[in-house]
Amino acid sequence: MHRIDCPWCGTRDEAEFQYQGDATVVRPDPDASEEAFFRYVYLRENPKGWHTEWWHHVGGCRQWVKVVRNTLTHEIFATGRAQEDLPLPGTRAKPRRRTRPKQ
Amino acid sequence: MHYSALSVFLQGLRGHKGWQRMWRAPQPKAEYDVIIIGGGGHGLATAYYLAKEHGITNVAVIEKGWIGSGNVGRNTTIFRSNYMFPANTHFYEKGMKLWERLEQDFNFNAMVSQRGVINLFHSDPQRDAFARRGNAMRLAGVDAEFLSPAQLKEMVPILDFENARFPIQGGLIQKRGGTIRHDAVAWGYARGADSRGVDILQNCEVKDILIEGGAVVGVETSKGQIRARKVGMAVAGHTTQIAKMAGIELPVESHVLQAFVSEGIKPLLDTVVTFGAGHFYISQSDKGGLVFGGDLDGYNSYAQRGNLPMMEHVMAGGMAIMPAIGRVRLLRHWGGIMDMSFDGSPFICKTGVDGLYLNGGWCYGGFKATPASGWCYAHTIAKDAPHRLNEKFTIERFREGRMIDEKGVGPNPWIQ
């Protein structure tokens, strides 16, 4: 069971979330080449190891949570809000704690 | 050594001491005509058909672990060819025909059991969709029959026909579908390939693919360099990892799919049944265990184990159609890593590298495709051109907008 630390709701079970795929792909500009759109829609890194991905907290706050998770061990290293740039392990210091938005 | 009733009898007289190993454990040669990466069902079948159909016997099958340790032993053993799109229908029907003659062909008991595969439907629109698929199958020469609730009740009395939420309105049956002992498929193909001269190299991991001037020249392995002008990948689950060694990017993600076996019980189900309102498929093995599965866990994974939420979801699907199994205990469960392609259909094709071939992207459908996949892949490798049956299973189809999206859910592998 994955336990995902939602920045808004706290740690919740995987069953509350809907996976939404690789969070590293970025939609190209509207006038970008066909090749750029082909890559955006169809090609993925599919790493064996750390993967930055979206989990939609569909059974909770309905926010999209960014998660850094290991595809081999299922360990979760960091979670954050959509606009956050989460580091992969080894690239910057310690695992990040979730950051709650200011009330 | 030919297996027959007579050989069993004669060995019985000698205390069964004369049986030989089913395949050798050779040392790798410096060079082969063809190298197949991956000693699973598809890789072994490919080597078998390369030797048998095309006379290419100087072949090595390179396997990281032991043969059959991957998905060929991690499925629910079902085979069928009830697809709607022509590219799939004809390909899987080729597989069906090979399954029907497989045991005589490779002289090994794979316990092929054509016990029928029934897809249940639960609503009027679903009935129409199933009728359409059944008609498409029949037009392509594949067997399909429509079952009324009365016919179904006679065949599978334990179903919950009056389920309040998902009443069973009927089913579509493919009577030639059924189950097979999956390990025996790997062993039978391995034995058949080995006896024709194919070297099966176990515990030998491919570390790199060697390319010179745009053409493949061999592979670097944990047992040293092995050269060949033709190299075929058959490592579904890890296809993107191997393809990366040759600089090939693919529309594939790796996902985990679980399967389950219950304790052995008395005969309850003599066919294969799938739930139409969720994703659940079940059969009963000859040992009495109920063998069943459902959806992917639904997140990228290379771990050969799944998680509890999907187990609960699968069991819920089972309870919706067969509440009688609610007290049966689960004996074992496991996970296999699927190559989930972005349209739900596979690849059997050439790549941008001369002499390098791709077989992967099998999604849920890999096991039932094993013979057809091996047969078509062997043809593609031997002739350096695809067979008519697999010519649409290319990588380029995504760029060209010719996806074979049987399920039509868009480029989201985790819901294919």
Image: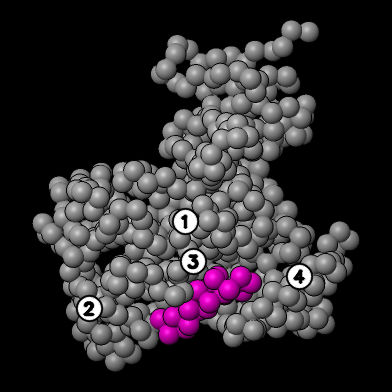
Q: Are marks 4 and 1 in contact (CB under 8 Å)?
A: no
| Chain where mark 4 sits | B
- Residue at label 4? B129
Distance between mark 4 and mark 3 Cα atoms: 24 Å
Q: Three-letter amino acid code at disc 3?
A: Lys
Same subunit under labels 2 and 4? Answer: yes
B220 vs A52, left or right, is left
Distance between mark 2 and mark 3 Cα atoms: 26 Å
Mark 2 vs mark 1, foreground winner is 1
x, y (%) of residue B224?
15, 47
State whether residue B71 appears in this view.
no
Dot 3: within a 10 Å radius of its alpha carbon, few (fewer than 14), some, or many (20 or more) residues? many
- Residue at label 3? B392
Distance between mark 2 and mark 1 Cα atoms: 30 Å
- Residue at label 2? B55
Location of residue B283 (image quadrant)? bottom right
